[in-house]
Image (spheres, grey):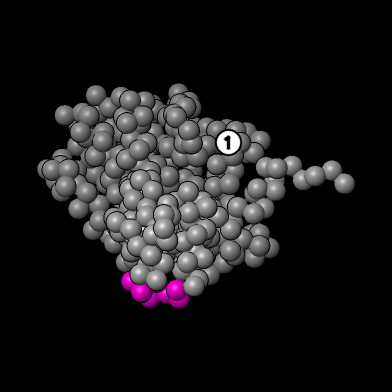
Amino acid sequence: MPRLPESLDAALRAFQESRTLLTAIELDVFTAIGGGARAEEVASRIGTDSRATQMLLNALVALGALNKRDGVYSNTPAAAEHFACAGRLPLMHNVHLWDRWSRLTECVRQGTAVDLVDIEKRGEEWIAAFIAAMQRNSQEGAPAVVEAVDASRVRRMLDVGGGSGAYSIALVQANPHLQAVIFDLEPVLAITRTHIDRAGLATRITTRAGDLRTDAYGEGFDLVFISSICHMLSPAENVKMFHKALAALNPGGRIVMRDFILEDDKTAPRQAALFALNMLVGTREGSSYSRSEYKNWLEQAGFTGVHHVGLPAPASLMIGVKP
Ligand SMILES: C[S@@+](CC[C@H](N)C(=O)[O-])C[C@H]1O[C@@H](n2cnc3c(N)ncnc32)[C@H](O)[C@@H]1O
């Protein structure tokens, strides 16, 4: 029998590596190691079994997350920076995603997420990790968006489901005349405001609590920015959201939608195709969508000049203009 291709064999076993890292993050192993510690010391600090902790630490060395010398474990520079102390919070979102992904089989049977709980009811710790993860990704992606969007002539922008506010903050910092309104759920906005205050932008960025599915978005904006939102909605909900964005814009104003956008046969880019499953396990009707779907929905809502703008992977933009 021909051998299983290496890439598929590796994918079959990849859960072992993921789970090893996620358990170490969940137990806060990297913080407990600090400047270097023996397995028994780590176990005593995090309240775990000494033998099992040693097995976990050895596997982390094998994965390249830790070093080991004379029985003393230390963080690699990457682990010290990304997994220990404050670096841990955004990664707790991955720990939470594991729980959902382990229900994938049932979700495929049922066609939707099982036992879904509304964001507001997921608890402070879940929301803090979720928004920290969004902040980490969005801070990385923001410079490319600032460059691609050119908001130099925009006076007022609306950031629908703005999360930590990373994109609004970057756009406002780059454009001295720009004012932004970040629209999100109140428990999230409590975190958003800490980021706005830290950036010293409380006079230029305001927040508005509401439900993006059911509430109107206001009016008089030159730009409506919608990042990583469309994937959690159904096609009909996206069309409705684009209609409301159109109503919120001044004539000539733009909608800029940022997301994982699939090619038309929906099998690439790889991360966008896998992200569709992330939405299957985490939302009622969300998915990754294709360029032509977004184009159709934006045009149905009344936007013109709809076009796709590539960004450094993995996400890209769809832009349209209100006539
Ligand atoms: C994946 S995050 C994207 C955050 C941000 N736009 C970014 O790209 O970093 C989705 C955001 O939508 C918000 N959200 C989810 N459901 C919402 C709703 N029904 N009404 C308003 N905001 C919502 C979440 O609180 C979260 O901030």
Asked whether mark 1 and ligand 1 are closer than 8 Å, the reply comes as no
**Residue 48 included in the magenta stretch of the image:** yes
First to last magenta residue range:
43-50
**Residue 278 placement (x, y as % from top left):** 54, 53
Q: Position of residue 68 (x, y in %)?
A: 43, 55
Q: Can residue 298 be spotted in the picture?
A: no
Question: Is residue 22 shown above or below 265?
Answer: below
Instruction: Give the residue displayed 41% in from the left and 67% down from the top.
Output: 39
Please name whichever residue, 313 or 59, is drawn nearer the observer in this view of the structure.
59
Residue placed furthest toward the right: 1
Q: Is residue 222 left or right of residue 305?
A: left
Q: Which residue is mark 1?
A: 269
| Image coordinates for residue 204, horizontal then vertical, percent | 15, 40
Residue at 35%, 42% (x, y): give it. Answer: 138
- Quarter containing the C terminus: top left
Tell me what residue is drawn at x 59 percent, y 65 percent: 103
Look at 66% across and 59% down and name the residue there.
Answer: 108
Percent position of residue 144, x then y: 36, 29
Dot 1: element: loop
As drawn, 169 above or below 189: above
Instruction: Please count the marks in the image.
Output: 1
Could you tell whether 301 is left or right of 12 in the image? Answer: left
Question: In the current view of this chain or complex, which residue is farthest to the front?
Answer: 70
Q: Residues within 10 Å of mark 1 (few under 14, many from 20)?
A: some
Q: Name the residue type under label 1.
A: Pro
Could you tell me if residue 259 is visible in this image? yes
The reply to whether the magenta stretch includes residue 189 is no
Position of residue 23 in the picture relative to residue 254 (left or right): right
In the figure, 40 relative to 158: above or below?
below
* Magenta stretch: dominant secondary structure: helix
